Amino acid sequence: MMQRRDAAEPADAGPRKDWGGYVRIDTHCHSWASSKPLNKAVGLIDCPECYSPPEQVYDQAMARGMDLVTITDHDTIKGALELVNRGFEHFIVGEEVSVQFPEDRCLLHVLVWGISPEQHEQIDKYALRRDVYQFARWLGEQNLPHACAHPLYVQNGRLTRWHVERAALLFKGFEIRNGAHSDAQNRAIERFVDRLSPGLVHRLVAEHGIEPVWARVWEKARTGGSDDHGLLNIGRTWTGVPIAHAERIEDPREFFRRVMRGDSMAGGVGGHSALLAHQLATVGAHYYADRLHEQRSPSGRYLGSRLLRFAGVRAPSPSKARVAAYKATKRLWRPRKARSLPIVRALRNQISPLLDKYPELGGRMDPSMWLDGAPLSDHERMADFAMDLTAALSRAMGPGMVRSFRKHDPARISEHVISYALVHLAQLPYLVSLFHQNKDRNLVERFEHETSERGSGISVLERPMRVSLFTDTISDINGVCRFIQNVAERAHRSGRDLQVITSSRLEMPPDLPNVYNFDPVFATRMPRYDNLDLCLPPMMRILRHVDKHQPDVIHISTPGPVGCIGFLAAKMLRVPVLGVYHTDFPAYIDRLFDDSGLTRLSESFMRGFYRPFTAIFTRSEDYVRSLSKLGLDGSRIVSLMPGFDVEQFNTGFADRSIWKEHGVRAESVKVLYVGRVSVEKNMPRMVDVWKRVHELCGKRGLDAELIVVGDGPYRPEMERQLKGLDAHFLGFRHGVELSTIYASSDMFAFLSTTDTLGQVVMESQGSGLPVLVTDRGGPKEVVEDGVTGFVLDPDDVNTWAERVVGLVADERARRRMGAAAAESMQQYSLLNSFEHFWEVHTRAWHEHLEGLGVTRETAGVTGNGRPGDDVGHAAAAVPGR
C-alpha cells in the first residue's frame, strides 16, 4: 500500500442519478462481429478484438438502465443484424465506419446509426472509405445520423488539428465522451465543440476551402458511448435526449432525429488505464479459453477455469477428484519433475485469502451475476486487487528465491525467475494500457493550446508545471536524502506541484505531504550493507499513481529500481526526464569490490542510464569532467547551485550539555563525522587517521574524541579497530538533535573521495565548524583551504593527523576558521538552490513543448488564419467539396 494520499480513479458504477427525464442509449459498443485483430501484432495469433455475443450486449445495456440499444461494430453490421432478425425491440443497427483523408490517408472513425444493409454495401461499392469528403456527402444525401468517433484518437500516426477542423466542417455529430479513451481527450474535444460558432465556422471555411455538408454545422449533435469490447462497460457512458413529462421515445430513429437536431447530451464515465487494461485482459481470456485451455493439464484447467471467471469467461473445469488423481499419478511416474512452479503454489495459497478482502469481487465470480458485469468490470477494485495479488505473490516467493541463491541451486533459481517473469507478464495489460492511454498526450496538449482562447487557462502554457521526483532513498542520513527532503519541503512551502516517489520500508520524513512511499513488493538486506534494504518497488502501482498526476517533467534522483520506474514513466508520458548525478557510482564500485570488470560494467550502465536525459545536474564542477568522461553530452550537464537549510544548521543550536547523555566528556575537543559508515566513504582511512591522532594527542596531553553519526556495514569493524581510542558511535540522529550535535562539535573530518558535493560539509560549516576534506571529489569546492578548513591528500595519513591535532591544540584557530566557515555558507541559500532547480526543469519543459509546436505564437490559432500544424496545410482543397 502507499503511505500517502492517493486520488480516486473514475467511478466505474453506472449513473446514480435518476435519469427519468431522459431517454438514453449507449451509442458505441461492439460484439463478436468486430472480429478484426486489434493490431498487426495481435493479428499474428489471429486474435479478434471482441468476443461479446450480440444478445449479451443487448441484455447488459438494458440491465444498466438504457432505454434503447445499438451495436456499432467495425465496418460490419453482422452482429446488429443478428438482433434485428430475432426481433429485438428498441434496437437500431449501427456501424463504426473507417474512412480516410485522401491527402495523407489519415484514418478516421465515424459512427453511423439506422444504416440498412443496402446502405452498408454502398460504402464499399462506391469506395467511400478511401475519401472522407465523398463519405460525408453520401451521409448527407442519405440523411443518416452519425458522429465522428473519438476525434482526438490517433489511429495511424497522421492525425493533426488540420484533420479535426475539417471533420468539424464535414460532420454534424461529434462523440464528445468516449468510455474507453482518456478524459483528457474527452474534455479537449468537448471544449472545441463548445467554442464552435457561426463566426469560427466561417473562418474555418475560409482557411480550408471547403463548405460544410450540414446546415448549422456549429450546432453539433453530441454523443457519448462506452466503446465496450468485453461486456464490461456497456451503459456506463451514454447519449441522452430530454423528454417531456409522460413522453416516451420507443423508436430509435426518432431519438437520433433529435440528436441530430442538437438536443442531446453525453453522460457517464470517461476512460482510464485500468478500464482499457481490463478490456484487453477480457479479450485475452476469451482467446485463451477458446484456443489453449483444453490443452492444459487437469490441474492447469482447474486453476485456469477459476482465473477465467474474473473476465466472465466460462471454461470447463475437471473435478477435484480428477485433479487429485492426476497429481498422484504425476508424482508416481515423474517424481523428480512433480514439483510445480513457485507461482502455482503461491497462487493456491494467496488468492482465496486475498479474495476475502474483496467481497464485492468474490460475489461477482458467480456467473449468475455477470449480467451486470464480471469482476473485471469493477475497474478500481479489480486494479487494486491485481496490484495486491502481485505484491502477495512476490512476497510469498521471495524467501524461496533468496534461499535458492544462497544454496546456489540452478534449478530452483530458474523456477523462481520464471515465476517472477509470469507475475510481471500478468501485469502486461496494465502496462500496455498506460502507454496506450498516454500516447496521444502531446497531440491533445497541442490541440488544446491551438484551439483555446488566450487567457482561458486551458493552454498547457497557462498552468503551473507538474514534476514527479523518483528516488530510491530518502530517509537515510546522507547528502542525497537531505537534498531531496529540502527540495520536497521547499516545493510544498512555495505551492509548487512536486511529488516525491519512493519505495522503502523505512519511516518517511514527517511533515512532507508531497512524499509518496509505496510499500516494496519484496525487500531484503543488501549484500555487504546489512543496514540498507534492497527493495523491489511495485511498478504498476507507481505507474498508475503517476498516470493520475500527469507530470510535465520526470526527475530521477537515483539510478536504482525506483529510478528505473521513473525512466519508464517518462517514456509512458512522453515527457522530458532530468536527473542528478549525486554520487560517482563507478568509483564506489571500484573501491567496494576492487574489480575492474564490475567497474566497467557500472560505467556502461551509468552511461546508458543518463544518456537520454534532457539535463543532468551535478553539484560539483569536478564531476562535470567525470560525466564527460562517461561519454555524456557536456551541453546537457548543469551545475546545480549548492544549497542547504541555513535555518536548520547554524551556530545557534550549540549546546555542549548534549554530550553528557551520549557518554562523551564535556571538556574534550570533538572531531565529528556524519554520514554512511562504509568502505566507499573511505572510513578505513579514517581509522588510520584517528589512530595516529589519538597517538599524537596522548603524547602532547591533548583531550580529543571522535564522534561518528550514522551507520553502515563498516561500523562493526570500525568500532573494533577503535575500541579504547575515544571513538563514539551514535548511529542515526535527526532533526534538532542532529543540528545540536553539529553546532556543539569542534571540527569536521570527511575523507570521502567519491561524493559529488558533500551536503554534510556545508551543514558542518554552516554550524560553525572548520572542516577537513580530501582534494578529490566535490566537497573541496565549498571549502576555502586555510581559511574555512583544509583540503588534503587522502593518502597522506600523517598530514591529516597533524592538521587535526593542530586544530585540537589551537582553540583560537578553531574559532577563527569556524566563524569564517559559517560566514562563507550564507551564500548557499536553500531557497536560491531550489529556485535554480525549478527554473532548469521549467526550461526543459518549455523546450519540450516548443519541439511540439506549443509556443506563445501558436496559442489560439484555430480560425485566426495563422499556421499551426504543417501537416495537411499544403494539400489543395478538392473542388466542389
Image (cartoon, rainbow, N blue to C red):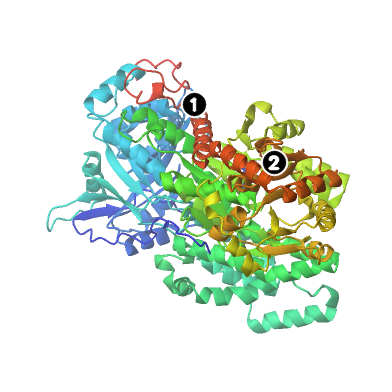
| Amino acid carrying mark 1 in the image | Glu
**With 104 as the anchor, is 632 left or right in this view?**
right
Q: Secondary structure at mark 2?
A: strand
Q: Position of residue 547 (x, y in %)?
A: 49, 49
**Residue under the image location 35 percent in, 42 percent down:** 187
Front-lying residue, 205 or 869: 869
Classify residue 592 as left or right of residue 116. Answer: right
Return the disc, 1 or 2, that comes first in the chain's sequence. Answer: 2
Q: Which of the two marks, 1 or 2, is nearer to us in this view?
A: 2
* Residue 757 found in image quarter: top right
- Which quarter of the rendering shows the C terminus? top left
Residue at figure coordinates x 76%, y 34% from the top left? 630
Q: Is residue 625 visible?
A: yes
> Which residue is nearer to you in this view: 814 or 305?
814
Residue 2 image point, x, y percent:
52, 61
Q: Going 46% across and 66% down the picture, which residue do you hit?
A: 374
Q: Amino acid at mark 2?
A: Gly
Label 1 packing within 10 angstroms: few (<14), some (14-19), many (20+): few
Give coordinates of residue 206: x percent, y percent. 31, 17
Q: 770 or 10: which is nearer to us?
A: 770
Mark 2 lies on residue: 789
Compared across the picture, whether 162 is left or right of 267 comes to right
Q: Determine whether 239 is above or below 123 in the image.
A: below
Q: Quadrant of residue 452?
A: top left
Q: Residues within 10 Å of mark 2 (few under 14, many from 20)?
A: many
Residue at which label 1 appears: 850
What is the total number of numbered labels drawn onto the structure image?
2
Label 1 and label 2: CA atoms lie apart by: 47 Å
Q: Closer to the camera, 875 or 3?
A: 3
User: In the drawing, does residue 646 fall left or right of residue 810?
Assistant: left
